[in-house]
Image (tube, grey):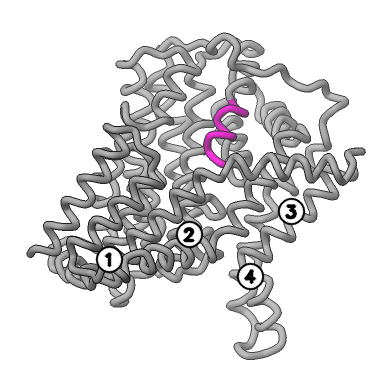
Amino acid sequence: MLPLIVIAVAITALVVLVAWAKMHPFLAFILVSAGAAVALGMPLEKVPGAIRKGMGDILGSLLIVIVTGAMLGKLVVESGAAQRIADSLVAAFGERRMGWAMALTGFIVGIPLFYGVGFVLLVPIIFAVVDRYRLPPLVVALPALAALSVAHGLLPPHPAPTALVATFGANVGWTLLYGLVIAVPALVLAGPVFARAVASIPARPLAGLTTAARAESELPGAAVSIVTALLPAVLLLATAVGGSLVTPGSAAARGMAFMAEPDVVMLAALLFATCTLGLARGRSFAAVMHTFAAAIGDVASILLVIGGSGAFKEVLVQSGVNTQIGELLQALPLDPLATAWIVTAAIRACVGSATVAGLTAAGLVAPLVADGAVDPNLMVLAIGAGSLALSHVNDAGFWLFKEYFNVSLADTFKSWTVMETIVSVVGLAGVLALARII
């Protein structure tokens, strides 16, 4: 029991350092990992090596995907492609189905963009639509923001789902395909459907935090904008399906395996975007590279957090306590996927950050996947869904919503917290349903 007590204390310390002391999660992970390693009896001389190995293993498999994803998202924003996507969808759906238009807008924009970038981008679009059609602000806002949450928690190439794919040895293409299946009901219920229930909540944009829309003549075409933004998802799905159709061991299978690598997919999509949203729009190659360089700063902190989580996981592995945790979780009278969701949701409620919650839980439930007790692709999605539950005052997204939309604290709980939890619960239900089918 002593090792389990040590891990419980370590997780408590992580929560205190991140949520109460406001320490950066990277430093918190390193300190907690080192302390747990010593408390679990790991020789002192092996502790630094374990931390380096854990960080190196997880970052080695994710660095290209996350950085190229940030570069693609930055280019989608700066080129005006994101605004073109939103304008086109709003025009296509019309005023009566504006909630559905904004849900689809948030989903398309959310696939290539990281959460914070997508949030800031959508705010001026949301209030431009509100002003144009005189609609209740949350009827427009919640569908778009629910879509962002779905993409952030469930869909590669976002950092947390991609890191979980690497942790569990899942297939990124199949994880994305299953994630899309689950995303639809989660998005519908948490977005357009739930938004009607809170339509009366007043909201208005925070002065100085919205940006002026670009002129029509400055925007790329709708088709090229949508194709470029969705290309990573299309390529991942195509290679996942195509790989199952070719003869194993054949030249076609080897070629498909190469193209299915997330690094290759993201590099191909980035090169395509460089041409369609950069050079073809009259921007110089140097200007496009400047955009890409700026994007690195957007994800530096995320990469550090992911690296720190890898160190914590490696301590669990090298100390052998992960096996004990796995045996304990397997003994619970619950579905392993539900267990993973509960563990993640509890950590999320404590630390606030969805990314930290998901990556912390991954190290605890990894033995369930290693023992073959559950499909690794579904485990990624169960943890991703759990990481979205119970957003409250220790979550940056909670305050982004409250401040950007000038909503009271009580109304933020009624709208934002409930919306995030609906996404999480529906996501779990979808995962459990898929587990009965595949």
Q: Nearer the viewer, residue 285 or 167?
A: 285
Numbered mark located on residue 270 in the image: 3
Q: Main secondary structure of the magenta part?
A: helix
Q: Is residue 144 magenta?
A: no
What's the residue type where badge 1 is placed? Leu
Q: Which residue is mark 4?
A: 260
- Residue 423: in sight, yes or no? no
Q: Quadrant of the N terminus?
A: bottom left
Q: Which residues make up the magenta segment? A: 114-122
147 sits to left or right of 276:
left
Tell me what residue is drawn at x 32 percent, y 75 percent.
370
Q: Which residue is mark 2?
A: 178
The secondary structure type at the circle numbered 4 is: helix
Give the mark, 1 or 2, whose residue is nearer the N terminus: 2
In the image, residue 368 lies at what x, y percent? 27, 69
Badge 3 density bin: few <14, some 14–19, many ≥20, Cα 10 Å: many
Label 3, label 2: how far apart the Cα atoms are:
24 Å
Numbered mark located on residue 4 in the image: none
What's the residue type where badge 3 is placed? Leu
427 sits to left or right of 238:
left
Label 3, label 1: how far apart the Cα atoms are:
36 Å
Residues marked 4 and 3 touching at CB (< 8 Å): no
Numbered mark located on residue 316 in the image: 1
Label 4, label 3: how far apart the Cα atoms are:
15 Å
